[in-house]
């Protein structure tokens, strides 16, 4: 396999390398989110100059077919004209006021009308804020402290939830984080994904990604979410769906609409902000009414419900009809089938799971059903050389074996075919490297 120097040349051009060196002097690790540093794939990151549709261009002039799509936020593709127009019109009126706007009302209406059982939402600026606040709300509503989460599910980097996390934490190989006191996670119980844990009357809530997408794509097995709902009901605990990724990505009603299980509370993000910083927590009216200013649970944010973000989010949601989801699912299906066949021909063991509009690649000889399975696949060490080989062929995947691929509505059939062709060649290269 390629050594680190070779990998660096394959992942970043000279201008990106220069910028990364400059960034390392003024930004810890040179990045503002750890996975961007390419630590798990080798080399140094490319720096993006611009993006349009399914493609981005780095500062070295290299055009890349992008399956990161701002980690799923850009469901219409980069720089969609309607989104840019909405942002420009909103910006012309002012970028932030610290006061209510009509855009907040209209976006809240769009979300609550689409998601059954979600009566109200409160906007924040990030998924971490949404998850942190929804846990506080659940604890206040139940008068209990304990929280159950699942290994490999990531709910942001707040202290109480940074235990057994997936995605960025798993990428770094850390079980939690330095600086998080034991007291912060002492009431957090971590259970295996796809297994219904014992839930007693000390538990305030169970928070789960209804479709896990931060350890690669791991779908819920039959009965898992139904079992969680029943267990929470028996114990008087609240069920929280973290749909920061799946919300408005897998359908208008998110995972709730596909799996038929309705939680008490939700977290939303990514798609609802149209590519700008926006997230939300939502749920039943009786629970949401406990938030300040009408209830005792405090939450606030200077930029919450930012008018640019709500305008962008509305522009996106207005274009996500049933036809859009069918088109997206068709593209994902074509990609998944193509990748499985192309990589499989090389002799590499591969699993390409699909759930609606979500897809990922595991270098595994068996289906992955939990974090341990995802970790075993990652530890085989095949994703990093595959990532670099794909990037060398102009296809940008997420730089971690614990992430999924995000297909946008801007990805054409030709883009999918090009990706599959690149994967076939990349897999052969990886397989040959194993034998050298």
Image: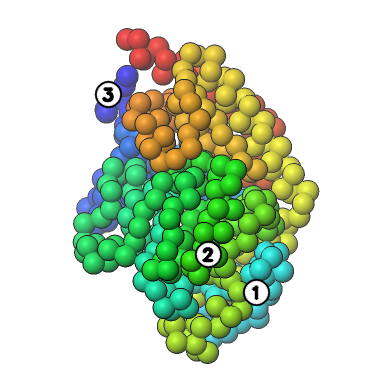
Asked whether the residues under the numbered discs 3 and 2 touch, taking CB atoms below 8 Å apart as contact, a structural biologist would say: no
Q: Residues within 10 Å of mark 1 (few under 14, many from 20)?
A: some
Rendered image quadrant of residue 265: bottom right
Residue 204 x %, y %: 43, 69
**Spatial separation of the CA atoms under disc 2 and disc 1:** 23 Å
Q: Label 3's element?
A: loop
Quadrant of the drawing holding the N terminus: top left
| Left-right relation of 387 to 314 | left
| Left-right relation of 157 to 193 | left
Residue 189 x %, y %: 35, 58
How many discs mark residues in the rendered view? 3
**Spatial separation of the CA atoms under disc 3 and disc 2:** 55 Å
Where 358 falls versus 129 (above or below)?
above
Which residue is drawn at the image coordinates 55% and 78% (left, top)? 287
Q: Is residue 15 visible?
A: no
Rendered image quadrant of residue 119: bottom right
Where 407 falls versus 413 (above or below)?
below
For label 2, the residue is 234
Residue 346 x %, y %: 50, 14
For label 3, the residue is 3
């Amino acid at each position: 396999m390629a050594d680190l120097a070779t990998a660096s040349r394959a992942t970043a051009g000279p201008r990106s390398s220069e910028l990364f060196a400059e960034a390392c002097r003024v930004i810890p690790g040179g990045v503002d989110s750890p996975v961007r540093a390419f630590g798990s794939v080798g080399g140094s990151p490319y720096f993006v100059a611009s993006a349009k549709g399914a493609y981005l261009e780095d500062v070295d002039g290299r055009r890349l077919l992008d399956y990161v799509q701002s980690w799923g936020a850009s469901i219409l593709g980069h720089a969609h004209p309607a989104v840019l127009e909405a942002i420009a019109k909103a910006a012309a009126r002012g970028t932030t006021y610290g006061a209510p706007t009509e855009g907040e009302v209209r976006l809240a209406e769009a979300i609550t009308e689409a998601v059954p059982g979600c009566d109200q939402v409160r906007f924040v600026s990030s998924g971490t804020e949404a998850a942190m606040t929804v846990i506080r709300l659940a604890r206040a509503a139940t008068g209990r402290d304990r929280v159950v989460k699942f290994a490999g599910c990531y709910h942001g980097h707040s202290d109480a939830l940074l235990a057994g996390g997936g995605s960025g934490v798993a990428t770094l190989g850390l079980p939690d984080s330095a600086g998080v006191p034991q007291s912060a996670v002492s009431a957090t119980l971590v259970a295996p994904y796809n297994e219904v844990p014992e839930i007693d009357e000390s538990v305030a809530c169970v928070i789960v990604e209804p479709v896990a997408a931060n350890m690669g794509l791991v779908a819920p097995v039959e009965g898992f979410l139904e079992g969680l709902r029943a267990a929470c009901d028996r114990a008087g605990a609240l069920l929280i769906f973290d749909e920061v990724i799946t919300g408005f990505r897998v359908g208008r009603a998110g995972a709730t609409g596909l799996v038929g299980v309705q939680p008490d509370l939700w977290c939303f993000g990514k798609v609802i902000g149209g590519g700008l910083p926006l997230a939300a927590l939502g749920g039943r009216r009786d629970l949401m009414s406990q938030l300040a200013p009408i209830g005792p649970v405090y939450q606030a944010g200077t930029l919450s419900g930012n008018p640019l973000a709500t305008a962008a989010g509305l522009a996106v949601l207005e274009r996500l009809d049933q036809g859009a989801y069918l088109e997206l699912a068709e593209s994902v299906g074509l990609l998944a089938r193509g990748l499985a066949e192309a990589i499989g021909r090389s002799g590499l063991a591969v699993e390409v799971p699909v759930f609606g509009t979500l897809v990922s690649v595991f270098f595994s000889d068996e289906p992955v059903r939990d974090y341990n399975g995802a970790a075993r696949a990652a530890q085989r060490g095949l994703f990093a050389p595959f990532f670099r080989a794909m990037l060398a062929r102009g296809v940008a995947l997420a730089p971690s074996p614990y992430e999924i691929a995000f297909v946008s509505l801007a990805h054409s059939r030709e883009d999918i075919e090009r990706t599959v062709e690149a994967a076939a060649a990349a897999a052969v290269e990886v397989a040959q490297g194993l034998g050298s």
